[in-house]
Structure formats: C-alpha cells, structure tokens
Image: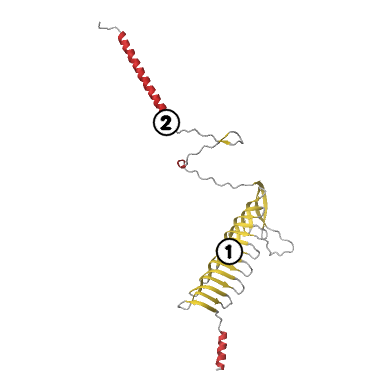
Amino acid sequence: MSDDSEEYDEEEEKLPYLGEYEGERNEEGERHGYGKAILPNGDVYEGQYAHGKRHGQGTYKFKNRSRYIGEYQDNKKHGKGTFFYADGSQYEGDWVNDEKHGFGVYHYPNNDTYTGEWFAGQRHGQGTYFYAETGSKYVGTWVNGQQEGAAELIHQKHRYQGKFMGKNPVGPGKYIFDIGCEQHGEYELKEMEEEEGEEEESVKPPVPIWKAKKITPLTLYTPPLPEVPPQSDIPPAQEEPQTSGVGEKAIDQPLPDNSGTDDAEKKAKENLESLMTEDIKQVSAEEEEEEKGRQSQSPNLNE
C-alpha cells in the first residue's frame, strides 16, 4: 500500500496546476455569477462570470502588481474601466476588445496627462496632452499615437497655431503673444549634417526651422453675424435715441401721440368735401339767376 501511494503522489505532482475557483456555478458546472479565481500564473480575478468567462464588473490583479477594475466581456476588458500599471501610470476610460478605445484619460509616470480619443490602443482623434514639467499643452489632432494635423501648442506666455506631422510643426503658422501681437511665418524641415566621427548608418531626423515673415496686431475673434429673417417676420424697429453732439449723451425725446391723426385727416377731408359741395351749389344758383336775368332782358321776337 505504501508503494502504491508513493506512485500516486508522484503522478499528481506531474499534473499541471489549473488554478483555484471559489464561487457560483450554473447547472452545467460553469463558473457563472460571482466568484474568485486564482489563475495558474498567480493572477487573481474577483468579480462576475458568465458561462465560464469573465463577464461584467470585476477586479483583476496581476502578479506584477498591476491592477484592472472595470467591465469585462468574454474574458476581455470591454466597457468602462481603470487600469493601474506597475510603473505608476494609469488609464481611465473606454475599452473595446481588451484595448483602449473611445474616450479616456492617461496619467503618465512623469505626471504628464493625455485626455482625448483612443483607437485600438493608441491616441487617435482629438485630444489634449499636458506637459507637467513646462506647463505647456498640445490641443489638436492625433493619428496612430502621433501629433498630426491642425493643432495649437499653448505655452505660458504665447501659443503656436498651425499643422503638425510626426510631432513636428510643418508649413504655415503663427505665434500669438500675450503682449498683443502675432508673428506669422512658416516651418521648414531641414536635414541635419553629420558630424565627424559619426557612423554613416545613423540617420538623424529632419529638424523644423521657423522662418518669420511678418508681425501683425492681435486678431480678435469676431463672431459670425446672425442670419436676417424675412422682412415679414421682423417686428417694427424702435427709434434710436439721437445725440446732440459728439461725445454727448443721447437725448430721449418723447414721440408725439399719432393715435388721433387718422381721425383728424378723415374729418378734414369730410369738411373739404362739404365746402366743395356748397360752393358747387352756390355757383349753380348764381348761374341760374343770371340765366333768368338774361331771359327777362332779351326782346320778345313775337311781339
């Protein structure tokens, strides 16, 4: 018996360690509901399961001291979650298929931060990168983790507006200074000359060189004018107060009350028509009298 038990123990030691699980299961014996599992590599997961897979809210602790707290779907980080990395960095935001995807905030070990859009684990879209050491920040477009496209680089006392490509400003742009002026110019990429003693295979990236062209006053933002509605929809405009001279205050004069103007005009018209009618009658009567007088004075031809 002792020999058989020794052989059994040796065979058991050769079996791979499948981890441990303590929690709820479904009728099929799958991990389903809330549970805690110790994985064969030493990682620990505690949270929701569905049909044997991590699904729902849970906490995953890595043996290297990294930690994820958030949502899972089919064993993958998916939804809202926060990842605490072993180097001290941290990401909080959206996850899709185990990758940072959507909107999120990343805190770097040097206290820099990126706030914006992500795609397939990389900074991609609109975002803001804050440089903790200098207090500057880049606000603009990102493509596959690189600063690329229209953007604004904001410093403490001035800022630059233009386009970027591969972390470098390129093409036309302008510097805006807090003292109230702008410097317009253009960035040109210049190849750096190799120094003596350097290996031929080492290739230095081109360096952007700023070429200033002109300085102008600060361009203030002018909001667009609202669209003018059709005339039928415009209410009657009120009279503007008139000024009596340059620099003097406006003098508001009370407007006359014209509510009785129409009635006065109508009455005057009626009076005029009445006078005209009487004049016509009087002229007709006078003409009739004159005609009778002429007839009485004319000789009778029949006598």
Q: Which is more N-terminal, label 1 or label 2?
A: 1
Residue 211's spot in the image, x, y percent?
67, 51
Q: Is residue 32 above or below residue 282?
A: below
Which is more toward the observer, 7 or 206? Answer: 7
Residue sitting at 52 percent across and 75 percent down?
35
Mark 2 to mark 1: distance in Å? 80 Å
Q: Which residue is mark 2?
A: 263
Residue 49's spot in the image, x, y percent?
50, 73
Q: Are marks 2 and 1 in contact (CB under 8 Å)?
A: no
Residue 12's spot in the image, x, y percent?
55, 86
Q: Which residue is mark 1?
A: 122
Q: Is residue 154 above or below residue 275?
A: below
Residue 3, numbered circle: none
Give, as a three-letter code, the residue at label 1: Gln
Residue sitting at 43 percent across and 31 percent down?
262
**SS for dot 2:** helix
Residue 134 image-quadrant placement: bottom right
- Label 1 neighbour load within 10 Å: few <14, some 14-19, many 20+: some
Which is more toward the observer, 211 or 253? Answer: 253
* Left or right of residue 240: residue 266: left
Give, as a three-letter code, the residue at label 2: Asp
Q: Residue furthest right?
A: 196
Which tag is nearer the camera, tag 2 or tag 1?
2
- Label 2 neighbour load within 10 Å: few <14, some 14-19, many 20+: few
Q: How many marks?
A: 2
**SS for dot 1:** strand
In the picture, the quarter occupied by the N terminus is bottom right
Which is more toward the observer, 73 or 71? Answer: 71
